[in-house]
Image: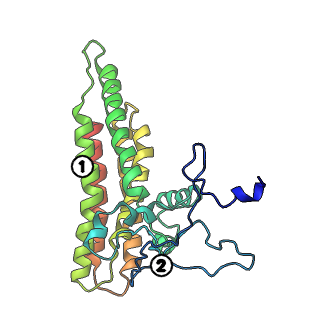
Amino acid sequence: MEDSSYTGLPTSHLLGSVPAVIVEEDKTTKHVVPDSKIQIYPPAANGGDRRPGGYQTISTPTETFEQQPTNNWRGFFSVSSYSQYFDVDTDAVMTRLISSLNPVGGDFFSKIDANPDLYGLIWISTTLVFALASLGNLATFLMQKHGDSSTAWSFDVSYMNTAAWSIYGYAIVVPVAYYFFLQYMGSNASLIKFWCMWGYSLSIFIFSSFLMIIPVEILRWIITLLTGVASASFVALNLRSYIEGNDLSATIIAAFFLQIGLAVFIKAWFFA
């Protein structure tokens, strides 16, 4: 029998036979979303896929860091609002410290006009607080040993509390009072500049505190008066140049005697 006669027989029912593969058209329903943001890229010239990294949306929102605005009440409680007032280098701080020690060295406000800082208000005040608390106790110890060495001596912790509320209170409240008063009188005052000037005016009291530990009472009073006059002259002269043209002589005199009063208070309380 010829081999060609077996070609027409059905073979799907035989054991071991492989069923034929029937190719059917893909009848999957494709859903099209009208408002879809999927971007369709045109096919590449070589038939490849031009989609970089798969499907991408047409417009992807960019996350940005929103800072608190400094021109409203929320900016008052934002740390970033005050960072600009501490953006000073060592040379600028040293120049302002030297200016505060030299009352006739020029207009202090013209030197800080472009960049007033709060370094003096914070760090100089803090340094003065610790200097008064520690050196005041040391001066009391030396005076006591100089007069009667048999008397027992103990460290007075209350010096720290008194130094804190007096120095911080003076450095904050007095400039604020002058700011509102000058605003009321029609002068264009700046609270940051006032805080800066009064803060640096306290630097001379730090240096004088080291001299006040000398157990000689008359010498202490001389140092107190010299320190008070130098600091008061620095404040009064710069305040006069700031409000020049206004009849506010009483305000300048009051600022002068406030600095003298601070010097006397430091002497009477911490170096008695």
Indicate the position of residue 190 as horizontal and vertical percent values: 34, 75
Of residue 74 and residue 41, the one placed in the foreground of this image is 41
State the residue at coordinates (29%, 67%). 76
Mark 2 lies on a secondary structure that is: loop
Indicate the position of residue 180 as horizontal and vertical percent values: 23, 75
- Residue 149 makes an appearance in the image: yes
- Residue 230 makes an appearance in the image: no
Of residue 215 and residue 22, the one placed in the foreground of this image is 22
Please name the residue that numbered disc 1 is placed on.
166
State the residue at coordinates (43%, 51%). 204
Local crowd size for mark 2, using a 10 Å CA cut-off: few (<14), some (14–19), many (≥20): few
Q: Could you say which quadrant of the image residue 4 lies in?
A: bottom right
Residue type pointed to by label 2: Ser
Of residue 129 and residue 258, the one placed in the foreground of this image is 129
Mark 1 lies on a secondary structure that is: helix
Residue 182: mark in rendering: none
Residue type pointed to by label 1: Ser
Asked which colour scheme the image uses, the reply is rainbow
207 to the left or right of 142: right
**Extreme-right residue of the structure:** 2
Task: Say which quadrant the C terminus sits in.
Answer: top left
Please name the residue that numbered disc 2 is placed on.
59
Of residue 89 and residue 27, the one placed in the foreground of this image is 27
Indicate the position of residue 249 as horizontal and vertical percent values: 29, 78
86 to the left or right of 146: right
Q: Could you say which quadrant of the image residue 243 lies in?
A: bottom left
Of labels 2 and 1, the one closer to you = 2
Above or below: residue 134 compared with residue 82: above
Above or below: residue 204 compared with residue 149: below
Of callouts 2 and 1, which one flags the residue occurring earlier in the amino acid sequence? Answer: 2
